[in-house]
Amino acid sequence: MSKDRIYLDYNATAPMLECVRDAMVEVMMMPHNPSSVHREGRAAKSLIERCRKDVAQHLSCFPHEIIFTSGGTEANNLALCSVGNMPFAVAVTEHSSVRAVRSDAYFIPVLPSGLLDMQALEAWLMRVPAPMLVAVMLANNETGVIQPIAEIAKLVHTYGGLLHCDAVQACGKIPVDMGLLGADMLSISGHKMGASQGIGALIVRHEYPMTPLIVGGGQELGRRGGTEAVPLIVGFATAINWMQRTTEWREKVRVWRDAWEQHIMMHSGSDASIILGYDAPRLPNTSCVRMKGRSSEVQLMTYDLASIAVSAGSACSSGRIAPSHVVAAMLGSDAGSENDIVRISMGWNSTEADMHIMRDAWCAAYDKTT
């Protein structure tokens, strides 16, 4: 990133790590097709399997349970479209790549904190036949709210169901352990943690039979056709290795985030309600803030002109700034009809000075609304 600008939109995409770039460039210069039987092909295959082992070690799963995909959206689609037509429920605050998969999905409500309404989930589990499929993300991409996935998995399994967990925003920011979470399927993405765009993975426990979305040469144990993107996979594994090894930045950004929130709450009259998910467990890097009376679009333009890059929520809506379904689900009628939130998300290359500048810009914008 240019030093002339401040980048606070890591939940949309993180800047590429230097170690990832170097690892990818080295591999890009070699002719790699893992399906070829000659020495170069075998070397490519060996490289992929080594990366698969590295990813598996960090996620506490088996290497053969990992399916490399083009990213989190494909991983979510593969998980939810390939297990048959069983009853399907999703948390109402899920990402669009989960919400849009089936038109007959039951939307599980959330509490004002953003946490899943467990009573509503259990009521649905009790009235539908098993097996059923439930999808709940580990950490929300807009608010950073962390769901109690282990508790949810236990409940779903009690009624004979399967749990899919979208961990795209969580992986690299908090520990992600398949064994502890108890999910049957889990999606992750590379570019959220400093790898390249175009690479992700779906982890499927217990060799559950999968119907591939992409058919072809039988790659990924027949679960996803197409020649594997060796440089992207190498960069992906490199990023996960770096994120698991380098964790000090997480606590730093948590301290800076908390200080930022305390300051703007005091500036706005100690109103904690402007921070979505404030009373729930959250990712250390994320703050989702409302500014009533000033639309997200106006706020984003104001900050962009001040050389600050933030977002108005999910970055997966083709550039549109529309009312957030996450905000509506959490606040109900209090959400209003216009999107008025801004999401600030830090990462491995953020600084305390960045947040000080953002704080001053937010307060200046707020003062114009009062």
Image (cartoon, helix red, strand yellow):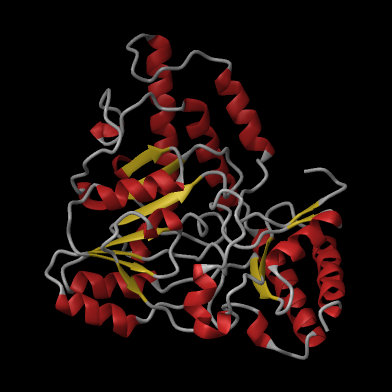
Image mark count: 0
Q: Nearer the viewer, residue 343 or 155?
A: 343
Toward the front, the furthest residue is 337
Image quadrant in which you'd find residue 284: bottom right
Q: Is residue 161 visible?
A: yes
Horizontally, is 102 left or right of 3 in the view? left
Horizontally, is 47 left or right of 358 in the view? left
Which residue appears at 57% of the width and 44% of the height?
A: 191
Q: Nearer the viewer, residue 339 or 9?
A: 339
Q: Is residue 351 visible?
A: no
Vertical position of residue 287 compared to residue 190: above or below? below
Which residue appears at 82% of the width and 61% of the height?
A: 302
Instruction: Give the position of the C terminus as an image quadrant.
Output: bottom right
Which residue appears at 36% of the width and 8% of the height?
A: 38
Image quadrant in which you'd find residue 52: top left
Vertical position of residue 42 compared to residue 213: above or below? above
Instruction: Give the position of the N terminus as an image quadrant.
Output: top right
In the image, residue 90 lies at what x, y percent?
Answer: 34, 66
Which residue appears at 68% of the width and 44% of the height?
A: 15
In the image, residue 179 lies at what x, y percent?
Answer: 34, 60
Vertical position of residue 364 compared to residue 235: above or below? below
Toward the left, the furthest residue is 129
In the image, residue 64 lies at what x, y percent?
Answer: 29, 40
In the image, residue 14 lies at what x, y percent?
Answer: 64, 48
